[in-house]
Image (cartoon, helix red, strand yellow):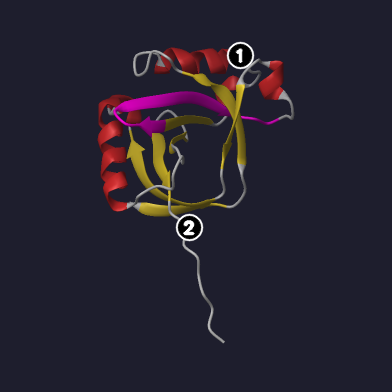
Amino acid sequence: METIKIKENISAFGFRVHSFPKGIKDAFDNLMNLVPDGIDRTYYGISYICGDEIIYHAAVQELNAGEAERYNCERYTIEKGEYKADRVHQWMKKVHTIRDIFSEMLKEECPQEKRPAIEWYLNDDEMICMIRMEQHATVESR
């Protein structure tokens, strides 16, 4: 695992996948077809663990202001900060392992309340599983 620092908030938009996990591929295909230059955009899976239920959102990075409204989608913000991360190569062949990767990460890093697990799709081969690390207050001595 590694630590990734996101320096600025990332604006994204998309929608909840109500038929999780079966509907994930269709959701991302719909997003790619919805936006111009869809194949060249950055995509994210944003999930929240609520007890035994996983609430999953398919999202694409917003490049132009107002796209979420224009395409009648929900708006998301991936917050800047440090994330515990695990890279997955050939992720399309390993989708059945993603839940286990996040479960292992959660054992090591307890996420802040209501912070999502993020799947950052870099390309058709590589994606990064990320959990935002808890921010601790620091005290400086004089």
Q: Amino acid at mark 2?
A: Gln
Question: Residue 34: which disc?
Answer: 1
Query: Label 2, label 1: how many angstroms apart (C-alpha)?
Result: 36 Å
Q: Tell me the quadrant of the picture where the C terminus can be found.
A: bottom right
Secondary structure found at label 1: helix
Mark 1 burial class by Cα count in 10 Å: few <14, some 14-19, many 20+: few
**Residue sitting at the far right:** 65
Q: Amino acid at mark 1?
A: Leu
Q: Is residue 4 above or below residue 99?
A: below
Along the line of sight, which residue is nearer the eye, 137 or 130? 137
Query: Which residue occupies 42% across, 54% down?
Result: 3
Magenta segment, which residues? 48-63
Q: Which residue is mark 2?
A: 135
Q: Is residue 29 above or below residue 98?
A: above
Residue 76 placement: quadrant:
top right
Q: Secondary structure of the magenta portion, mostly? A: strand
